[in-house]
Amino acid sequence: MSPFPLTRRAFHALAGATVLSLSVGLPAVAQTPPGVLIVGQIAEPKSLDPATVTAANDFRILMNIYDGLARYKDGTLEPEPALATGWDVSEDGKVYTFHLRDGVKFHDGTPFNAEAVKFNFDRMLDENHPYHDTGPFPLAFFFSSVTEVKAIDDLTVEFTLSEPYAPFMANIAYATGLIVSPEAVKQYGADFGRHPSGTGPFKFAEWRSNEAVVVEKNPDYWDGAPPLDAVVFRPITDANTRTAEMLAGGIDLMVEVPPDAISEFQNDRYQIFEAAGPHVWFLILNAKEGPFADKRVRQAANYAINKQALVDNVLEGTAEVAAGPTPPAFGWAYDATLDPYPYDPEKAKALIKEAGAEGAKLTFFVTEGGSGMLDPIPMGTAIQADLKAVGLDVEIKTFEWNTFLGEVNPGLEGKADMAEMAWMTQDPDTLPFLALRTGAWPDQGGFNSGYYSNPEVDALLEKARVSTDQTERADLYKKMQQIVHDDAPWVFVANWKQNAVATAAVENFQLQPSFFLILKDVAKN
């Protein structure tokens, strides 16, 4: 029997209220239905088409609807087989041959095969593909080295790369590599993101804007049917409201718990989860125009902001001060000799004076909340005060998360001098390649919204991504970190220790270093 009637019942009851009476004769109690997990999300998803989105908030839903050729092994960032049972790599590192799982079907009943894989990657990478207009595909950068995808037979697909590319398998296992139903894309076109069809443990059931996304159990899942009947993802943007819903029993699981709310869940009704991950919270500085076009002013901002106070007081110890663009979770590629900019307002004032930027007026884009954004409004307000103390006049402009991304990702030129940002990544190549390279300026399809440019950084990143020697890659990334630290295109603020809270009824949940929300083995007693 399909759990969908229960799903609809749960959705309608919980979208607007936390109290649900489950059967006649029982008093109404603050509880969620058996077999249904209610998740408090930080924002409305932008789309349920994995090739078109960039935010961890969206990926937390998508990883439960879709599979990729590979996935991350539980608790790691190590790729393991998923829709592919295995793969071979040519000696020159330029040809990857994937052997596909037999008998898998998409949720719409159509077969998963090599042609479906080819369709997915061609849709992203080939401008002449008939469904390329269902984009844009902002993370197609991940597969820019792919020159051809060939279906050898139904269960064999071959990727040819222009050159060896070290992060290729990490990117295949990432959300951008999730495989969608070609027939569903053909049916819905640009609206596919509202009608998703994958091969994952849960099937899409319903999306009510600003209320909930509902998915139900896929009883035929190739890796075993999940214990849950359904999952309801509720967007609750305000952190205090999300906390109140959790305490009232309206949701079973919430991510990104506000630091000042952790203590409210330290009792036997709840489980608190914490884990390190590859995360960095930073301020993008407009290096193309305005005061931050001068490196001295960018460095001054790094000295002016009391990052330890932000970590201790605003974030209440749930993060560590960041030293540079690479998170310490990438141990092998992280430069542990790099020290964070110390809090030194007098040095900041001297640099600002030297640059002739005293009294400069700055526009600062701040979001109300979003993926990994760490109390962004209190953080922004504290940063504004620190910069004012060294003579910079900062005006804050606040936006809802998806609106914020729409303002920041196309670039800050002509709009703002600085903006908050957070990234959670799966490989040390990802963030600097997509957000610090000259070739990643927004007009070239990247996320270098502050227009930073250094040819030496470009060369190091290009060399690191084609090296198959991890020791060499590590050395290149460490050199990049030293240069970027000095150039200060960002204010390096914090590396977050991700968290979540669940009720005592939730079983088999754990946080992942990928920051994905993997629910296929989760149960609720």
Image: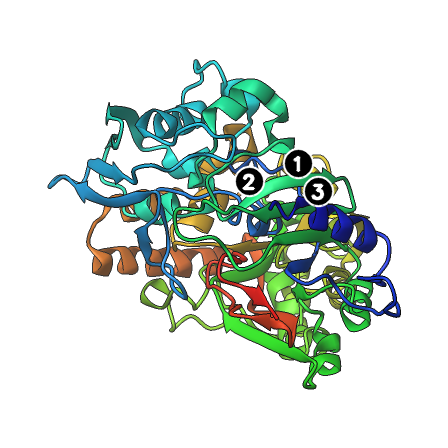
240 relative to 456, above or below: below
Q: Give the labeled residue for mark 2.
A: 451
Q: Is residue 491 left or right of residue 219?
A: right
Nearest to the observer: residue 68 or residue 439: 68
Residue 374: give x, y in percent of width and height.
Answer: 67, 64
179 relative to 498, above or below: above
Q: Report the amino acid beneath label 1.
A: Glu
Q: Report the amino acid beneath label 2.
A: Tyr
Q: Residue at x 71, y 46 (%)?
A: 5
Q: Is residue 281 left or right of residue 82?
A: right
Q: Report the amino acid beneath label 3.
A: Asn
Secondary structure beneath dot 3 equals helix
21 relative to 248, above or below: above
Label 1 neighbour load within 10 Å: few <14, some 14-19, many 20+: some
Residue 358: give x, y in percent of width and height.
Answer: 74, 57
Label 2 neighbour load within 10 Å: few <14, some 14-19, many 20+: many
Q: Residue at x 60, y 54 (%)?
A: 229
Per the rendering, the mark at residue 413 is 1
Disc 2 to disc 1, C-alpha distance:
8 Å
Secondary structure beneath dot 2 equals loop
Nearer the observer: mark 1 or 3; the answer is 3
> Which mark sits nearer the N-terminus, 3 or 2?
3
Q: Residue at x 31, y 54 (%)?
A: 80
Q: Residue at x 29, y 26 (%)?
A: 149
Residue 43 in view (yes/no): no
Q: Is residue 83 left or right of residue 243?
A: left
> Which mark sits nearer the N-terminus, 1 or 3?
3
Residue 453: give x, y in percent of width and height.
Answer: 47, 42
Q: Circles 2 and 1: CB distance less than 8 Å?
A: yes
Q: Give the labeled residue for mark 3.
A: 402
- Which picture quadrant has residue 333? bottom left
